[in-house]
Image (cartoon, rainbow, N blue to C red):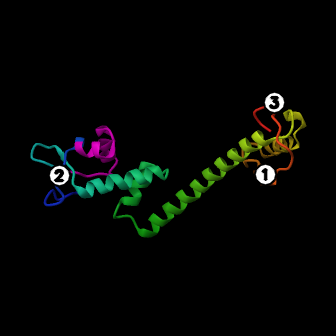
Amino acid sequence: MKSSGTGADAPMGIGALARRFGLATHVLRHWESKGLLGPERDTAGRRRYGDEDAARVAVILRAKEAGLGLETIRRLVDPADDTRDRREVLRTEAQALRARIAAAQAALDLLDCAIDCPHEDLDTCPTFRRMVTERMTAGGGDVPQVPPRAARAGTRQRSRGFLP
């Protein structure tokens, strides 16, 4: 992405742009090496960034916050990429994010189950025994489902173990 360096798009150096976003300058250089940024150069060869470049940095940061990698981000911001390809990349990333959310929710449910477990120890907890059995049969694949808090019955007692 090239910036014109005129008018409201007053150019800034790499340090100023990095400070604006709380980044180290090497991050911007790395993004440039990956094809995410393409700043103009002044007569001395120094990078000069404009408002369009700053907007691109904001887009990159948002995409990274969404869990996207730099190569995926490059594909998304590349104007030469087909819109259909872009949508397919986004669908794939959304599916992967949903899987991570499901795994995180299962982990949270497991912790909530352990916190609320009415049994004195793991050996007497049918929920834990069921989860162990499911894990043994699932191997490394499916994450055993822990019932949500509302579905678990019983009074709350302190468990001796970390898990229910």
The answer to whether residue 91 is seen in the rendering is: yes
Q: Which residues are magenta?
A: 16-40
Query: Residue 160, which numbered label?
Result: 3
User: The residue tagged with tag 1: helix, strand or loop?
Assistant: loop
Q: Are marks 1 and 3 in contact (CB under 8 Å)?
A: no
| Callout 2 secondary element | loop
Q: Nearer the viewer, mark 1 or mark 3?
A: 3
**Badge 2, how many Cα within 10 Å: few under 14, some, many 20+?**
many
Q: 96 left or right of 27?
A: right
The quarter of the rendered structure image containing the C terminus is: top right
Of the two numbered discs 3 and 2 in the rendering, the one whose residue sits closer to the viewer: 3
Give the Cα distance between marks 2 and 1.
Answer: 56 Å
Could you tell me the amino acid type at mark 1?
Pro
Report the disc number at residue 147: 1
Q: Examine the image and state in which quarter residue 74 appears.
A: bottom left
Q: Does the magenta segment cover residue 34?
A: yes
Residue 39: image location, x then y, percent: 22, 51
Q: Dominant secondary structure of the magenta stretch?
A: helix
Report the residue marked by disc 2.
11
